[in-house]
Image (cartoon, rainbow, N blue to C red):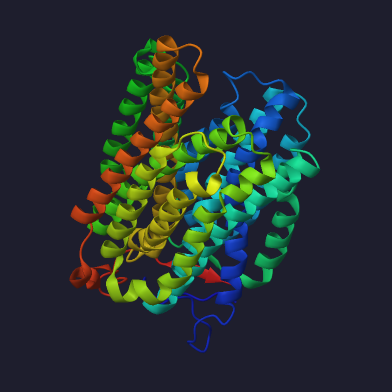
Amino acid sequence: MSVHPTTTGRAPQTRAGQPDPRRWLALGVIALATLMVVLDASVINIALPQAQHSLHISDANRHWAVTAYAVTFGGLLLLGGRVADIAGRKRTMLVALTGFALASVLGGFAVDPAMLITARALQGVFAAALAPAALSLVTVTFVDPAERARAFGVYGAVQGLGGAIGLLLGGTLTEYLDWRWCLFINVPIAVVAVLGAVPTVRESRVAGDRRYDVLGAVLATTGSVALVVGFTIAGESDGGWLRPTTLLTLGAALVLLVSFVLRQSRAEHPMLPLRVLTDRNRAGSFVTAVFSGAGMFGMFLFLTYYLQVNLGYQPIRAGLAFLPFSAGIILVALAMPTILPRTGPKALMAFGMALATIGMFTLTTIDGSPAWLGGTLLPELLMGVGLGFVFTPMNSAALTGVDPADAGVASAVLNATQQLGGAFGVALLNTFYTTTTRVRLGENPSDQLGAYLAGYRSAFLASGVLFIAATITSLTVLRGRNARKSSVPPDANQGAGEPTPSLAP
């Protein structure tokens, strides 16, 4: 049976005109599917020191186990979102789940650095299709404001829970079994998600003309990949931002991305319709995602090494040390369905980013003491609670009111801004860290711990500045509560002339 909504803004309907009774089961399956991506990000951070030792990865190349994933994930997200819109979001999610699991198996059996890095890059390819497909399925399934707020709240809580589970699971598997199980664990999750999605998730795709903008896809993908690679090599060594390779790569990325925007303004079938970027709330959410992602990803990397290398925490203890951060996100996300409809996203995002900024600056006071309660607990709580106020409203502001035909690409842009921001943040913070550490060691070669601490503090200070930028963006770009009605999904008249999604069980 196939059904077609009568307007571009309605939720999936049954023959009786009632919302799909399986939509909440579908949300659970979709959340489980994306849980795998979240798990993988946190698990690999905890496992990386052991994987580096096992595969004899040099210090200069160890970051590629993380950034190979970011390069393909961030670079292919726009293409993945458009493929999901046209080929079918459910179908894309199922294929991506299967591919992600197979890539994880390849990484788990890695015998050398090249095999692990290749597997991580393949995981990024399939995650670039999985993430926008899953998030856009939530968007087109829950259009009623109250239900959508609850759905995004559940989705956000699962993301926070996934981070916490990943940290604990990564520490437990690495310490008691082997780091390879941090990759193998994706297989049973993917199997359960696929089996659950087949009967519960409705297919959703763009109807009508479904041609791809091939040139636009090439420009967007190569430009995004070049941008991530440029950020990555910039942070590899002191002065990396001024290296010819860095400048050429970032220059090429700028040319390619500008060409992509020009192409989208003229293309008959654009991969990224520029109307997706013109909504003020949506644009503010994307910019906030860049700055918050940059600060958060960089903070995670350096805090992980601080705990395991400088404080000597075992993997499971390091995972436990991150729990206050994840707990803060989860608890606040669970409250968002009640708060968000009453306030709108602007106030929540601005407050949350301000609180997270305070937490980040508090983290600059670390002194190398092994007392976790006195060192990182308060900053983690402040950042976790603060970002909990940001993520669900940011998703809602970015996706509310988007035409269902553009749901996949809008979801992809949101994910891409976070990934590209994260790559930029790691490179930027690594520059601050290496420069500060080198200067301090030059002044006092015997004080290695002092040099490391100074490097960490400078990195966390830079993250705090990025969080300030996100706070200012939330305050100045997003519309206030009184303007929320402009974000209501378009009605039949407003949506005239736009393609509508085709829905099938």
Q: Between residues 467 and 74, which one lies in front from this camera angle?
A: 467
Q: Between residues 219 and 53, which one lies in front from this camera angle?
A: 53
Question: Residue shown at 41%/26% (left/top)?
Answer: 454
**Residue 318 image-quadrant placement:** top right
Total marks in image: 0
For residue 454, side relative to residue 464 (left or right): right
For residue 161, side relative to residue 487 (left or right): right
Q: Residue furthest bottom?
A: 16
Question: Residue shown at 41%/70% (left/top)?
Answer: 336
* x and y, in percent, of residue 323 in the image: 57, 54
**Residue 485 image-quadrant placement:** bottom left
Q: Is residue 464 visible?
A: yes
* x and y, in percent, of residue 481 in the image: 22, 70
Above or below: residue 469 compared with residue 245: below
Above or below: residue 203 compared with residue 230: below
Q: Between residues 90 and 214, which one lies in front from this camera angle?
A: 90
* x and y, in percent, of residue 21 in the image: 57, 82
Above or below: residue 247 compared with residue 367: above
For residue 233, side relative to residue 488 (left or right): right
For residue 162, side relative to residue 109 (left or right): left
Question: Residue shown at 53%/31% (left/top)?
Answer: 67
Q: Can residue 37 be seen in this view?
A: no
Image quarter of the C terminus: bottom right
* x and y, in percent, of residue 258 in the image: 29, 32
Above or below: residue 120 compared with residue 483: above
Q: Between residues 413 and 481, which one lies in front from this camera angle?
A: 481
Image quarter of the N terminus: bottom right
**Residue 259 image-quadrant placement:** top left
Question: Residue shown at 38%/61% (left/top)?
Answer: 389
Q: Residue furthest right?
A: 177
